[in-house]
Image: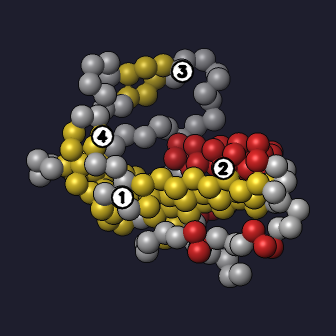
Amino acid sequence: MTDISRIKETDLSLDDFESIDHYPECGGIGIFIGTVRNHHEGRSVDALKYTAYKPIAEKMIREIEQEVKSKYSVSYIQVIHRIGSLDIGGKAIIAVAYAPHRREAFMACEEAVERVKHEVPVWKEEFYSDGTSEYVAGCCIRKDEDEGSHEHHHHHSGAKSHSH
């Protein structure tokens, strides 16, 4: 199979991933598909637009895949993130992991998705039913989650920050 881009401007599909047939040692498939929902923090959402700096995002996703593959000893892990405009129900991210057993497939898939969402420079702009739009604050790109206290801000109602 040809090497597929990890950042795509066209609709995502499970056809973008290698077949389990290439991995006869694997008995478990972990799949996560993240779709656009119609609300965020009490606001009605009509659509999203994802943007990314593709060269860096591609490189980082591939590095995360390699680290997760090694950590969980999975045979295959791949994450593809969509950029551009998406309507409600559109697929924003798909991750697939093949492993000898289900536990490793689940864990590898979950960690890969979490790391891509928190570390890779992909920005999400939400378009609301009232005609406004807003970039949604994500977590910082950092490796210091367990080192001391670190403040970051979200657009939550009520508290404006929390610490790690």
Q: Amino acid at mark 3?
A: His
> Would you name the residue on which mark 4 appears?
40
Q: Residue furthest left?
A: 130
Q: Residue at x 36, y 31 (%)?
A: 154
> Would you name the residue on which mark 3 appears?
164
Which numbered tag is attached to residue 24? none
Calculate the distance from the C-alpha at mark 2 to the C-alpha at mark 4: 24 Å
Calculate the distance from the C-alpha at mark 3 to the C-alpha at mark 4: 23 Å
Q: Amino acid at mark 1?
A: Gly
Q: Residue at x 64, y 22 (%)?
A: 147
Q: Amino acid at mark 2?
A: Cys
Calculate the distance from the C-alpha at mark 3 to the C-alpha at mark 1: 32 Å
> Would you name the residue on which mark 2 appears?
109
Q: Amino acid at mark 4?
A: His
Calculate the distance from the C-alpha at mark 4 to the C-alpha at mark 1: 14 Å
Q: Position of residue 40 (x, y in %)?
A: 30, 40
> Would you name the residue on which mark 1 appears?
89
Residue 38 vertical placement versus 155 (above, below):
below
State whether residue 19 appears in this view: yes
Figure quadrant of the C terminus: top right
Local SS, label 2 = helix
